[in-house]
Image (cartoon, rainbow, N blue to C red):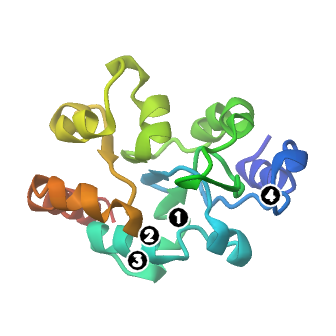
Amino acid sequence: MSWHQLLTDIRACQLCEKHLPLGARPVVQFHPDARILVAGQAPGRRVHASGKPFDDPSGDRLRDWMGIDKDSFYDPRQLAIVPMGFCYPGTGKSGDLPPRKECADTWRATILTELPNIQLILAIGQYAQQWHLAAQGRQTLTERVKNWQNTLQQGVLPLPHPSPRNNLWLRKNPWFEAEVVPELKRRIAQLR
């Protein structure tokens, strides 16, 4: 199967439609030339409506952390955006529900084989980190992000979710914006 057919099949996926409050609308972006993979959680309500990944305040913050503009961010030849869940999962008591597991189980390994040029994976949030850093064992998100230098050697940079809901985490962990964000910008600049 070609990468283009794979992308077409994913965008037509209805695998867990009956579990999604707004229906299936897979939101992904990838091309075999991409050197950077953004592995997020799942689209939020605004992204579901627009069909464009990180088309919300979280995306604004993430692009700022990365030091890139929207044109670069939405260029699939530069940047693959493949969340753990491709569709909006709905809302729970403290925010969006976890990503549906069907997406990663069904598609993730196949997608990664179609991305041979990836040199940096941004593992955003606990679900992406658990999948991409499974060998690290059980750790909290904060522990993973604090150990960013170790995982960066493997090509994976763990990040907190850039959501405004994480402002408290960012205030409690000022080392993230002082140490990790400058390194993230440097790596992104090297790979573009």
* Label 2 residue SS: helix
> Which amino acid does the dot numbered 3 rest on?
Asp
**Which of labels 4 and 1 is toward the front?**
4
Percent of width and height locating residue 106:
75, 33
* Label 1 residue SS: loop
> Which amino acid does the dot numbered 2 rest on?
Ser
**Which of labels 1 and 3 is toward the front?**
3
> Which amino acid does the dot numbered 1 rest on?
Arg
Q: Which residue is mark 3?
A: 60
**How far apart in space, not on screen, are marks 2 and 1 (Cα)?**
22 Å
Q: Is residue 14 visible?
A: no
- Crowding near pointer 2: few (<14 within 10 Å), some, many (20+)? some
Q: Quadrant of the N terminus?
A: top right
Q: Which residue is mark 1?
A: 77
**Badge 4 or badge 2: first in the primary sequence:** 4
| 97 or 4: nearer the viewer | 97
Q: Which residue is mark 4?
A: 11
In this rendering, the answer to whether 75 lies above or below 37 is below
- Crowding near pointer 1: few (<14 within 10 Å), some, many (20+)? some
Q: Which residue is mark 2?
A: 58
